[in-house]
Amino acid sequence: MRIGIDASRANCKEKTGTEWYAFYLIKALFKHIQPQDQVILYLKDQPIVDWGEMPVNFNFKILNWPPKFLWTQIRLSLEMLLKPVDILFVPAHTIPIICPKNTLTTIHDIGFEHNQSLYDQKDISRKGLGKNFLNFIVRLVTLGKYGANEYDYHRFSARLAFKKCKNILTVSEFSKKDIINTYKIEPERITVIYNGVNTDKFNISVKNDLTKIHEIQGRIGIKPPYLMTLGRIEKKKNSLGLVEAFCLLKKEKGFNDFKLLMVGKPGFGYSEILNKIKSYGLEKEIYLPGWVADQDIPYLLASAEVFLLPSFFEGFGVPVIEAMAVNTPVVCSNLTAFPEIIGSAGILIDPYNPGKIAQAIKKIFEDPELINRLTQEGQQRSKIFNWDKSAKLLSRIIYSL
C-alpha cells in the first residue's frame, strides 16, 4: 500500500500549533506503519528540520516546481492525478481538490465559522498584478462564492474536506460536536484524536535546571517574576483582553514587580495590541520577543509564575498541557475545548472579562494550597495526552480504510 502524507507544514523552521501537530504526529507514525507499506512525505522544499532516523519505507518527495502559490491545490493536486496514492493524510484541513477517495484530514477547529471579526481578511497572494489575477481565478472557479483571502480559504477548505474526505479527524469532542452541528456531518465520519505533549522536552525536571533557565531568561531579557502566554499575538487569542487584565493586576498590592511575557508571532490585530500596551504605559512591563526557539520554550514555561491562555476559540489548546507538564499553574478560557482538555487542573475564566482574569491570577498567589493542587493535578492531567497514543489511533484508521 502507498500512503501519502502532506508534510509541508511540518517542514517549517518556525513552527506554531498546526505545524507542531503535523511534525509530532508524523514522527510518531514511524513505528505504527507496517514495514511493507510505502509512505511518501510531500514537501514544498528540501527538508530543513531534523526528522531523526526515519524508517526505510518513509521517503520525502519534493514538489517544488512553479507556481509557488496554492501549493496544495496546484502541485499536490497534480501529483495525486499523475501518481496517485492509496491513502492521503493531510494534517491540516486544506486538502488538494484532486485527491484519492481514501483521504483523511484533521480539522482542528472551525472558529472562522462563528466569529469572522477574529480572522484576517488579507489576500493569500502577493501584491500587484498577481494578486488581482489570482483573485479573479478564484472568483471564476468558485462562481463568485470565494475570494483569494485567508478567511475564504478557511471556509472553502473545510467544505472541500467534508465533501471529499473518507474520514475527518479532529482534536476534541468539542470540535467534533461543533463540526456536526455546523455542517450537519454524519458523526461516524468524524474521529477524535487528541493532541499530545512532547515529554522529552516538557517535563518536571526542566523546572530544576536553574542554570539553563537563567541563561534563557538573560537572552530574552526578562527577569522573574513573570506571567506568560504562548501563541500568536492576535485577537483570536484575546491578547487585547490579556493586556487589559495585566494592567488591572499591576494595580494590586504585591504585583508591581511582575512582568508579562507574550511569546509568539504577530497575528491579526497586532498593531492594535501594541497601541493598547502603549496607551497603558506598559512598554517596559510587557515583553514581546516574537517567535522563540522551541528548545527554549519549556524553560520559559517552567519559570513562569502562571501560564495564561484566555482565547476566545480553541479546538484544543496545546500550550496549556505543556505548561501543566512543567508544573506551572494554568489560567485559561472557560469556552470551547478548554473545560474538556484541562478538567479541574486549571482555573477557567470568562475571557470577555479582564477583571476575572486578573482575579484568578491574584487568587493563585493568595492560596499556596491552590498552587499545590493545580500543579499536582496538572502534572497528572498532562500525562493523558501523548503523541504515540495519537499516532496509534491514526494508524488504526488508516488500516481500516
Image (spheres, grey):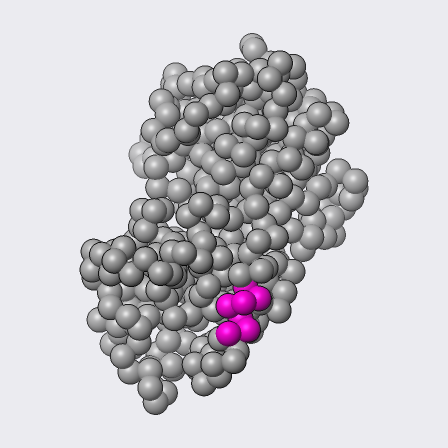
Q: Is residue 233 left or right of residue 222?
A: right
**In which quadrant will I find the N terminus?**
top right
Does residue 199 appear in this view?
A: yes
Residue 373, image x and y in percent?
55, 73
The stretch drawn in magenta includes residue 374:
yes
**Magenta residues?**
372-378
Please identify the quadrant where the C terminus is shown: top right
| Residue at left offset 35%, top offset 64% | 303
Q: Residue at x 63, y 21 (%)?
A: 34
Depth check: 27 or 21 in front? 27
Relative image position of residue 365 (x, y in whole percent)? 43, 81
- The residue under the point 58% across, 60% down is 380
Relative vertical location of residue 120 with respect to residue 35 in this rendering, above or below: below
- Seen at 58% across and 39% down, the residue is 388
Is any part of residue 352 visible from this angle?
no
Image: 284 above or below 300: below
From the viewer's perspective, is residue 233 above or below residue 21?
below
As drawn, 297 above or below 373: above
Q: Which image quadrant is residue 298 in? A: bottom left
Q: Nearer the viewer, residue 116 or 382?
A: 382
Is 81 covered by the magenta stretch? no
Dominant SS type (magenta): helix
Could you say where residue 204 lies in the image, as x and y percent from the top left? 44, 58
**Residue 50 x %, y %:** 37, 31
Q: Residue furthest toward the top?
A: 82
The image quadrant that residue 258 belongs to is bottom left
| Frontmost residue, 115 versus 28 | 28
